[in-house]
Image: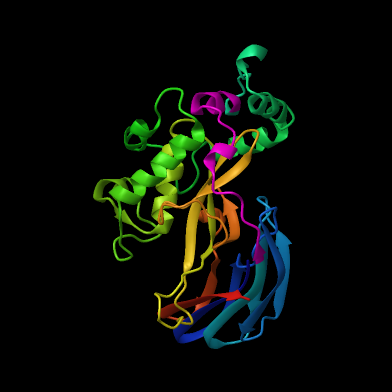
Amino acid sequence: MKYRITHSTLYHYSQSVGLCQNEVKLQPRNFWRQHCHNSRFDIKPTPMDFRERTDFFGNRVTYFAIQQPHSQLIVTAISEVTIFPRENNLDLFNQLTWEQVCSLLQGTPLQIPSQSEQSPSQTQSQVQIQDNNLEILDARQYVIDSPMVTIIPELADYARSSFLPNRALVDVVHDLMGRIYKDFTYDPTFTTIATPLSEVLNFRRGVCQDFAHLAIGCLRAYGIAARYISGYVETLPEPGKQRLTGADASHAWFSVYIPGTGWLDFDPTNNTIPLDQHITLAWGRDYADVTPLKGIAFGGGQHTLSVSVDVLRLE
């Protein structure tokens, strides 16, 4: 499935800004499930300094600075991406229990059943796990606390009913995702970027960012590696209605590391496993690692912000 994404951010200042410096993560990643054919920026006023790099997590990062006075800043990113979906069948993924995965992430050797007790798929999975020690080592950074996800007892309490003994990790996460979708109300007026997870959990309200952080915190509370993903999801119009330009929005979900299989995405806001309608921008430990646009401005007084996102499916 091929898409063109147009993401436009407008800052309007009450007073002139003399200098601003910005960092942008709005160019889609390239990985096995996704290929970004091209991506470009249209920035007004034109930056005097413009650089691109790759960060620690492999995300594409752009830095730019505007050094002339301005009262308005428009940053538009235009990208074309092809998505290659994976099968929506959890039985195809490694059936390691969550206890086994937790032991691996803690550096404990996996207790392998005797040859007579293993199925062919289990035997193959054990070989893959032994060959992926570096991948497991990398995943360990997604088990500990991060700037916006601190493990608190309340998270473990909420997740406990999903973590049944000897339950396959994929089943644990699928159950947790469904519970978040059922128990929490999507409310864009309730939280901000700074709202702590304890309030989200207490009032059972939030947005996609909050639900992703909540799931990540629940999983980390039990020693499971989970990372935050920023991106977009295609929204389809109701039958008989015309598609609205700019009606799509930035989105967030999470991914869980399953040894022998890799990272598997889950979208708790929509209670679905992302297939061919989710476009990935960046991933990291939490939102702080993947903020789409941030920076500093000297001057400007008060400002207003508006964001428009359009995800167009290309035939």
Q: Residue 279, position in %: x, y?
A: 58, 62
Residue 18 shows up from this direction: no
Residue at 46%, 23% (x, y): give it: 166
**197 is higher (above) or lower (below) than 301:** above
Q: Residue 172, position in %: x, y?
A: 44, 35
Q: In which quarter of the image is the C terminus?
A: bottom right
Q: In this view, does 257 lie to the left or right of 157?
A: right
Q: Residue 156, position in %: x, y?
A: 37, 33
Q: In which quarter of the image is the N terminus?
A: bottom right
**Number of disc labels:** 0
Q: Is residue 104 left or right of residue 39?
A: left
Residue 98 shows up from this direction: yes
Residue at 68%, 37% (x, y): give it: 135
**4 is higher (above) or lower (below) than 128:** below
Q: What stretch is highlighted in magenta?
A: 82-104
Q: Residue 117, position in %: x, y?
A: 60, 14
